Image (cartoon, coloured by chain):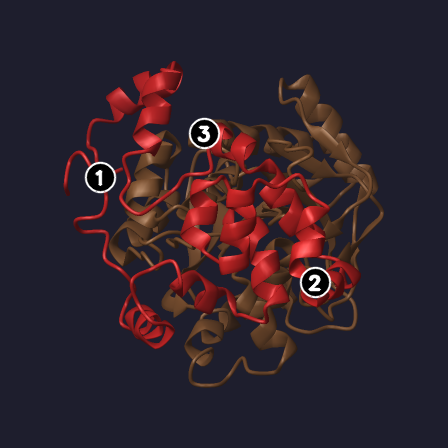
Amino acid sequence: MARITAGVGSSHVPLLGVAVDQGKTRDDYFGPIFAGYDWTREWEAKEKPDVIVLVYNDHASAFDMKIVPTFAIGCAERYKPADEGWGPRPVPDVEGHADLAWHIAQSLILDDFDMTIINEMDVDHGLTVPLSMMFGTPEKWPVKVVPLAVNVVTYPVPSGNRCWSLGEAIKRAVESFPEDLNVQIWGTGGMSHQLQGPRAGLLNREWDNKFLDLLIGDSDAARWIPHIEYLRETGSEGIEMVMWLIMRGALGHKTRLLHRHYHIPCSNTAIGHIVLEPAD
Amino acid sequence: MTDPNMTAHRATAARRNIHEYLAELEDIPGTRVYTAARARRGYHINQFAMSLMKAENRDRFRADEAAYMNEWPLTDEAKDALKARDYNRLLDLGGNVYFLSKLFSTDGLSFAEAVSTMTDMTFPEYRDMMLNGGRSPIGVRSIKGGY
């Protein structure tokens, strides 16, 4: 049977992709950020997951305002890196796992999550930057990916509670897939940042770290944090952290911390990173 | 999370009053949350900006901004704000930063530099603020509450 063996949380700031693509990951600015991912790159090389369920948000790349799906799952065989206006990132195409993705989609719908199914799309920095952070610059990504796109742009975005419950349903879906697969779930985006208006540049180290604390152990307090608290405390784009709750919800009742990293700033954003395993 | 009363959160989460929810979103200083009302108002601004993801459209826009904008059902107000790159005004008119970022890239601006134009700081001042830990949330969490 397939099983979820670990969860990873990570920011997905586009500038990190630029640093990787231009070979600047060890300079004075980016060095301290990337050093916090060294542990994870070594760990991933040993863990050798087969598939990543990668929770992210599209930043006006694959989706425009014509259609705004709240939860969408990629069921395609492969995905190309999107041209976000600066040209596509020079990274490998992303290989899907269509069998598992369709299984999860069907299972989620039967479990009362009315998913949007995507058969063709390009994937932007929200998905490719985490792959670069965890796997570096291989010729070919060493994993297959099931993209799970969440609307965190147009309000109302899904509640933390709904995201956590979706994670729980993803766990049930993966565990009912007959093939023996090592599956990880990644929640990406955040942490505190605000990219708009006179309040732009807001960061909140203290709140971000309390949020990381809440993901560890058997508390489910984070699922009840209301939208307004993310907005007030972590900036308008800090709301992306609800996507980490999908990852946390998929790890079961209790988690154990394997690795944690936090750094300010990267461009406009606080970088947060955590690696958890189920501890039930 | 800072609110110790998790029971209250649960009750609120169970059935949220939409009017209270939407009113709260307007209570954050210096912030335009991308609500349905803004998304409706700014639809054509955002779809126009989205079109700049294609290199050929960027070239046409750069060659004659006014002519390119005239191909879109934009109000004069929106066209003026776009021409002036007045991003705070564009947020008021329903623009969203992820869509407007296609205009940043068309202009060859980094995300941080474009974002800094929405604050009362120059880009070097903004960059220094970020290097020094960013903007503190103290005093800018709530208009009504003033905290």
Marks 3 and 2: same chain?
Answer: no
- Quarter of the image for the C terminus of chain B: give it: top left
Q: Is residue A43 visible?
A: no
Find numbered disc 2 in the image and state the secondary structure of the residue it sits on: loop
Q: Is residue A217 left or right of residue A148?
A: left
Specify the amino acid type for callout 3. Ser
Chain identifier, colour red: B
Instruction: Give residue A234's position: percent from left, percent from top.
Output: 33, 48
The circle on residue B64 is 2
Q: Is residue A93 visible?
A: yes
Number of residues whose C-alpha sits closer than 10 Å to that of mark 2, classed few (under 14), some (14–19) or many (20 or more): few
Q: Is residue A131 left or right of residue A258?
A: right
Q: Which residue is mark 1?
A: B142
Q: Nearer the viewer, mark 3 or mark 1?
A: 1
Q: Is residue B12 left or right of residue A73?
A: left
Residue in the image at 18% along x and 34% along y: B144
Do the numbered discs 3 and 2 sit on residues whose CB atoms are within 8 Å?
no
Specify the amino acid type for callout 1. Ser
Given the current orientation, which residue lies at the most extreme bottom position?
A: A27
Find numbered disc 1 in the image and state the secondary structure of the residue it sits on: loop
